[in-house]
Structures are given as C-alpha cells and as structure tokens.
Image (spheres, grey):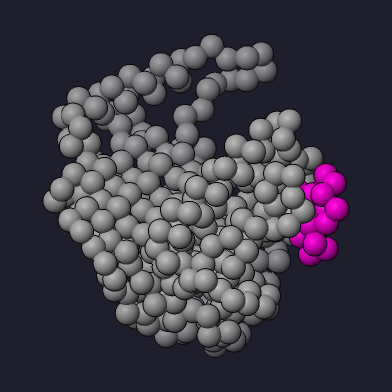
C-alpha cells in the first residue's frame, strides 16, 4: 500500500479525464466527485475506479462531451437525459437542477436516464447541505444481486443517500447500499486476498459463500440482511424501490438490463431504456419549519444519540456520516492509501496517455 496526497491524485485524475476529451470544467468536476470517495474512506468508488471509466470510454459507452438536457419538467420536477456522459458529471449537474427547483418552490425532484456510474451517492446528496436543504440521492447499478429466494441476478447494489443539515453538529449523512455489502468491497477483498463474511454473497446454486470471486462463477450479491431469516426481503424491497425511482420513472434501463460497469462484459439484449438511471431530491428546510429551529433540534437529536449508553465493549454510538467525516480529516492530513493493484492500474494509465506524473 502507498500513500498519496489529495493534490497528487487530483492532478493525475484530472489529466486522465482531460486525456479522454473532457472539458476543463467537466474534468475538474469528475475528479472532485471521484476523489470524494477516497477522502471519505469509500475506497471502492474512488481512484480505484478510474481505469474502469477509461475502459468504458474506450468501449464508446461513455461520451466525454455530453449535451445534458432536460426532457420534461414542471416547477418542482425534471427528467434529464445524460447523453451517455460520465455519471460523475451528469449526476452533480442533475442534483443542481433539483436544488435550483427547491429554491423556487420548496422541493425539487430530478430523474435521470442515459447516464453511467456516478461514484458515491454521498457527494451528490451532500450538495444540498450548504443550501439548508435535505439532499436525497439514489441510483440503480449493474445487476449483481439476487432477489430473496432467487439465484438470478436482477438488481444492482442500488445505493440510497440522505444528507440532513444540522447546526453546531456535523451533518447527518446516511449513505448505504441496499445490499449487505457493495461490490466494491468484494473487489477490495480480492486485492487483499481475503475472504468475504458470511451473508455477503451466494454461489450459483444459491448457497452461502465466502469466496470474493464468486460473482465470476455465476454467484450473486445478497440483499441487505443476507437471507430471509435476517430480513433480506427488506433489502430486496429497498433495492427494488431504488430501481423503480431511478429507471422506470426516468426511462433508463432497469433490473437485468442495466449496463454492466466492466467494459468487457457484453451489454444486455432488448434493453428497455437508455443507460443507467439516477434519482435526486432536494427539500428546503424552511418549506417545513424555520431552518435555524430545525437545525437546533437536529443538534439535540444528534447529541442525545451520541450520549446513548453503549453495550459492553463499545466506546460510542456513531451518527451516520461520522466515519466518513473522520476519514476525510485524517486523509487530508496524512494522505490517501492506495493498494498496489490500483497503483499498477494508475501506472498503466500514465503510460497510455503519456502523463508525466510518477504514480
């Protein structure tokens, strides 16, 4: 493992996005969104994904110069066509539309079709915080998840993020996959040659497995809960809701027809929509009650939960968003850890695009 400063990774990533044809503005935005994952400790969705985006561009599945447009709108809603752009660019621009609508009418809701993988959901939802708004973000993803009782992969990890501002306390940010674990965590285990915990994946016969390579052999990720006895039907339902909001509402592909992230995996046949779908929401706090009053009560809520009596062996109760915020503070100071297989990918990109930075 090696450590790199944020600026080192930022400059290198931006150079790569510029090399595939992104504008200066879009390369900067894509890099900011991408590295927000590394800063927040979500290593599966940051710099480790950079080579994957390049491969999608090489396969002509990513348009580096998209003309993002609104297909349909009302004062509080819009449907956006991402023109096959990087989700890292399409998503924050769509979220900004939701925020702008909320400024005008109290809430804004935007569905997106024809997009690609957008990094971490947290970045987009958190855009609303500085406007004293609640941010909501969802996306569907490559079908790697078997519904409860099935061996067929029909859903993605389909994350949900809700970001809520507070006053003196840090914001509440719940950013979670609707599976027991995101696929990126399996990729990290593969790089470390470690086993997966029980309840993350099943083999092609539907039996529980600890092999992080199981997906390559026809296995599937499991919905949040792992199995029916532990509530996987609830994770399945949540993943289905994300799929419907993100894709059926927008006109994107859904279920087994969502385009795969790995560029080498063939595209599904008879696709019913366009690209990957997202869904964004922004709600102005003062559309419900005075923002300062709300944030004071959010502080009270957070402080009460922080002071909750802990079970034996635990030091504190964590508020959603705490681990990521603490990781960001540490990594800005000490650098971002990058595993050797990812370093090798970055070196290949440097050679491919004749970039001068030594990685």
Which residue corresponds to the image point at 52% horizontal and 58% vertical from the top-left?
A: 140
353 on left or right of 63: right
Q: Position of residue 131 (x, y in %)?
A: 22, 46
Confirm whether residue 32 shows in the render: no
Which residue corresponds to the image point at 68% horizontal and 72% vertical from the top-left?
A: 344
Q: Quadrant of the C terminus?
A: bottom right
Q: Is residue 316 magenta?
A: no
Q: Position of residue 203 (x, y in %)?
A: 83, 53
Image quadrant in which you'd find residue 266:
bottom right
Of 89 and 97, nearer the camera is 97
- Assign the magenta stretch its main secondary structure: loop
Q: Position of residue 27 (x, y in %)?
A: 39, 74
Q: Which residues are magenta?
A: 200-219
When the figure is inspected, residue 65 is found, relative to residue 82, above or below; the finding is below
When the figure is inspected, residue 169 is found, relative to residue 304, above or below; the finding is below
Image quadrant in which you'd find residue 208:
top right
Of 200 and 353, nearer the camera is 200
Which residue corresponds to the image point at 42% horizontal and 81% vertical from the top-left?
A: 64
Q: Residue furthest left?
A: 104
Q: Quadrant of the N terminus?
A: bottom right
Of 319 and 144, nearer the camera is 144
Q: Position of residue 54 (x, y in %)?
A: 55, 78
28 on left or right of 288: right
Confirm whether residue 302 shows in the render: yes
How many dots with numbers?
A: 0
Of 271 and 52, nearer the camera is 271
Image quadrant in which you'd find residue 213:
bottom right
359 on left or right of 320: right
Q: Is residue 209 magenta?
A: yes
């Amino acid at each position: 493992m090696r450590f790199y400063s944020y600026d080192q990774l930022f400059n290198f990533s931006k150079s790569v996005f510029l090399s595939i044809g992104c504008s200066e503005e879009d390369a900067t935005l894509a890099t900011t969104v991408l590295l927000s994952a590394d800063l927040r400790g979500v290593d599966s969705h940051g710099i480790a994904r950079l080579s994957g985006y390049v491969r999608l561009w090489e396969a002509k599945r990513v348009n580096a110069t998209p003309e993002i447009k609104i297909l349909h709108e009302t004062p509080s809603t819009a449907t956006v066509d991402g023109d096959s752009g990087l989700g890292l660019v399409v998503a924050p621009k769509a979220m900004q539309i939701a925020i702008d609508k909320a400024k005008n009418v109290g809430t804004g809701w935007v569905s997106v079709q024809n997009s690609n993988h957008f990094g971490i959901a947290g970045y987009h939802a958190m855009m609303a915080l500085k406007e004293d708004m609640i941010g909501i973000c969802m996306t569907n993803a490559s079908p790697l998840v078997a519904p409860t009782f099935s061996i067929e992969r029909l859903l993605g990890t389909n994350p949900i993020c809700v970001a809520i501002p507070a006053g003196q306390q840090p914001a509440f940010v719940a950013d979670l996959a609707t599976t027991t674990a995101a696929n990126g965590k399996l990729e990290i285990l593969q790089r470390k040659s470690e086993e997966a915990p029980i309840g993350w994946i099943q083999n092609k016969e539907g039996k529980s497995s600890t092999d992080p390579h199981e997906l390559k052999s026809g296995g599937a990720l499991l919905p949040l809960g792992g199995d029916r006895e532990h509530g996987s039907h609830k994770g399945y339902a949540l993943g289905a809701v994300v799929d419907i909001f993100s894709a059926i509402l927008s006109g994107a592909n859904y279920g087994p027809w969502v385009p795969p992230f790995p560029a080498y995996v063939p595209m599904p046949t008879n696709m019913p929509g366009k690209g990957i779908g997202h869904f964004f929401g922004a709600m102005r706090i003062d559309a419900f009650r005075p923002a300062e009053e709300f944030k004071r009560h959010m502080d009270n809520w957070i402080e009460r939960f922080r002071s909750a009596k802990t079970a034996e062996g635990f030091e504190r109760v964590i508020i959603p968003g705490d681990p990521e915020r603490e990781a960001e503070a540490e990594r800005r100071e000490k650098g971002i850890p990058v595993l050797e297989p990812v370093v090798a990918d970055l070196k290949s990109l440097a050679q491919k695009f004749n970039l001068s930075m030594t990685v």
